Each structure stands twice: as structure tokens, then as C-alpha cells.
Image (cartoon, grey):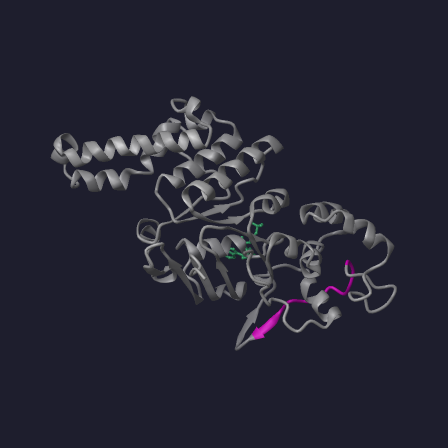
Amino acid sequence: MQTPILSVEHLSMKFGGLVAIGDLSFTAPRGEITALIGPNGAGKTTVFNCITGFYKPTEGMITMTRQSGEKFLLERLPDFQITAKAKVARTFQNIRLFSGMTVLENLLVAQHNALMRASGFTVLGLLGLKSYKDASRESIEKAVYWLEKANLIDRADDPAGDLSYGAQRRLEIARAMCTGPELLCLDEPAAGLNPKESLALNELLLGIRRDTGTSILLIEHDMAVVMEISDHVVVLEYGRKISDGTPASVRSDPKVIAAYLGVDDEEVTDALVEVGDDHILEEGDVAPPPALGPSETSSMFEGPIEDTVEEAGSETIVPASPAASKAAQVEAQTGATDPVKPKGPAQ
Ligand SMILES: Nc1ncnc2c1ncn2[C@@H]1O[C@H](COP(=O)(O)OP(=O)(O)OP(=O)(O)O)[C@@H](O)[C@H]1O
């Protein structure tokens, strides 16, 4: 079996007394698309920030194993080396393009480091070195390749800020790909996209996996995207893993459904649609599954709201959200002993 490209072990991240991530372990298989999902505030972006060096985790180990076999402990690397050496690239929840530059220029800027290396970091190198001229030609070829893949070649000379939202998302991904990553981390790439743009995004991501073998780690709320393109899904709730497996196994996991239903009554329909199981609504209206409800009047959609304040040593841990863990409630009701036992990634 291949070594996973990314291995997160016992990761914890505290902000003062708030535990954003608590003892989280999961792996991202090489060459696959892994989705990290969970309700708002579950800690997904914090995990990304730990992987990409924006935060130094309080505890834990994040190992990136490159195709060559070289290993990098990401929590120990300065963030610029995470891209340059460990070959991890990321996009952000909010689009961060150079909106006044053209679409092509955005892709060339991403390759600035390689170009400067080829110039020997000298003006003479910029003007005369063959290595610079070769690198310059290659960077343009690479940019054109990714513009075609992202279906943006016709817009190459337009300012990036003039593109539609969906096209800007694809440009961000193309820009990240120009850095030659082995692991591409995407923070909510489908946010704000219309169905047509979502489809174009899916095609781009599936094409990246198929044509380059790049592994993708994806935070996404759009379950249509997650279910369509992911090979493996990891579900977080309050900074802890509650499910881990294939899209199909995660989608039918009662703990996941319960976690997504930790919302106000009027949002239940949206949550069910989001988790991709709107037919559960009808089942829930009729009767709760016997295994999940201690009595006929109980429902997995209801239950006492418990506090999530715990004591860790002398520190008071404050809740990340006022609601109790719905997954924990289901666990208690079903008598499960290990709510986070991985079911194993898709083969
Ligand atoms: N820099 C920070 N300082 C303090 N608290 C933080 C910081 N970053 C995140 N948090 C808290 O950590 C928890 C997890 O936040 P995070 O943004 O990782 O969740 P998320 O799952 O990505 O949410 P969303 O889906 O809404 O983007 C939240 O309670 C958040 O307020």
C-alpha cells in the first residue's frame, strides 16, 4: 500500500482556552481527492492553516511525503518552504488574485521564484542567461497549459478582476497548479458558484487528479461537489473527527447527519440537503430509527443541549459553539464506543 501523501497525527490547536482542533488524526491518500467537511466552526480552516504553515499547532505532527519518498514535518517548516520544498499549494476561502493584473500575469507571478532562480538573482542573468530565457519560455508554456485546462485561455489578456466569480476560482486553482504542487489544498472552492460554475470546477479538479496525479485536499460545504468528486471524506465536528470513509459511508453515518442537524429547526431542511440526504427528512418526521432513540418520543434530531466546557489540566476549555455535539448524542444513544474510528479511505 502506498504511503499517504499527508498524515495528520494527534493534531491540536488551541486559541487561548478555545480548542479549535482536538487530537485529530487522518490521512490523505496519494493521488486521491480527500474532502474535509463539517458544520461551521468545526475547525476545517484551522486544519488547513496548520498544514500550510499559517498556524503552528499546539500539538501533533503533520507529515507530507513527496512522490520521491522525501518526508517533511510541516509543523516545523517555515510557511514559504511548505510551498517551495514540501510542494503544498493552497487557495483561500476569499479569492486572493491580483485583480489589476491580467489573467496570464497572475499565472506568471506564481512562477516568479523559479524564474529568479534561473536568472541567478542578477540583472545580467535576467538580460543574458540562457537558463533564464528557457525558464521564461517554460513558465509561459505552463501558464498557457493551465489556462486551457481552466477554460480561461480566451480571457488571458483581461484583468483578473473582470472575470466572473467562478472563473476567478478556476484561475486561483490554475495559479496554484503553476507552482507544481504535489498536494493542492482548496478552501471552499465551490463557495458562491452557480450550478454551471460548480460543474466546471468539478471537471477541472477531476482533470487535475487524472492528468497530473496531484493529490487534493478540499474543504467544501457544497455536498453535491463533495459527493461527486471525492474519493475519501473526513468529517469534523467541534475540532474532532466524527467520521472518515468513502462518500457513501459518511453520507449515511448517523453521527454525520446528527452533526449537520445541530442547527435551528428552520434550518433543518437546508442541513439535510447540505448533507445530501434530504429523504431522511421524511423518515425523521415519521419516527426516529429505534437504534438511535431511547424512547418513542425521542428523535436523533432532538435531545438536550449540553455544555461543551471541559477542564484540561488547569485550563478552562470554552466551547467553540453553544450547541452540544450532536454526534456525541448519537454515540451515547447507540452505545458506540469509538465515534471516530476510521472506516478507511476509498480504495
Ligand atoms: N485565529 C483565531 N483566533 C481565535 N479563534 C479562532 C481563530 N481561528 C479560528 N478560531 C476559532 O476556531 C474555531 C474553528 O474555526 P474554523 O474557521 O477553523 O472553522 P471552519 O470549520 O473552517 O468554519 P467555516 O466552515 O465556518 O469556515 C471557531 O470557533 C473559530 O472561531
Q: Quadrant of residue 108?
A: top left
Residues shaded magenta: 301-311
Q: Quadrant of the C terminus?
A: bottom right
Q: Is residue 113 or residue 291 the one in the foreground?
A: 291
Residue 229 spot, x, y in % from top left: 56, 44
The residue depicted at 53 percent of the width and 66 percent of the height is 22
The spot of residue 187 in percent (x, y) is 50, 46
Residue 215 higher or lower than 344, as above or below: above
Name the image quarter holding the N terminus.
Answer: bottom left
Q: Is residue 61 above or below residue 226?
A: below
At x 32% / y 59%, what residue is drawn? 70
Residue 33 picture location, percent across and down: 51, 49
Q: Is residue 282 left or right of residue 219?
A: right
Which residue is at the front of the view, 48 or 28? 28
Q: Where is residue 17 drawn, in percent x and y?
A: 53, 66
Viewer-side residue, 248 vs 333: 248
Please give the name of the residue rendered at 72% of the width and 65% of the height, measured from the top-left corner.
330
Q: Is residue 195 above or below residue 3?
A: above
Residue 15 appears in the figure:
no
Please state if 142 lies on the left or on the right of 202 as rendered.
Answer: left
Ligand 1 sits in which quadrant? bottom right
Residue 309 magenta: yes
Q: Residue furthest bottom?
A: 313
The answer to whether residue 170 shows anywhere in this view is: yes
Q: Is residue 234 magenta?
A: no
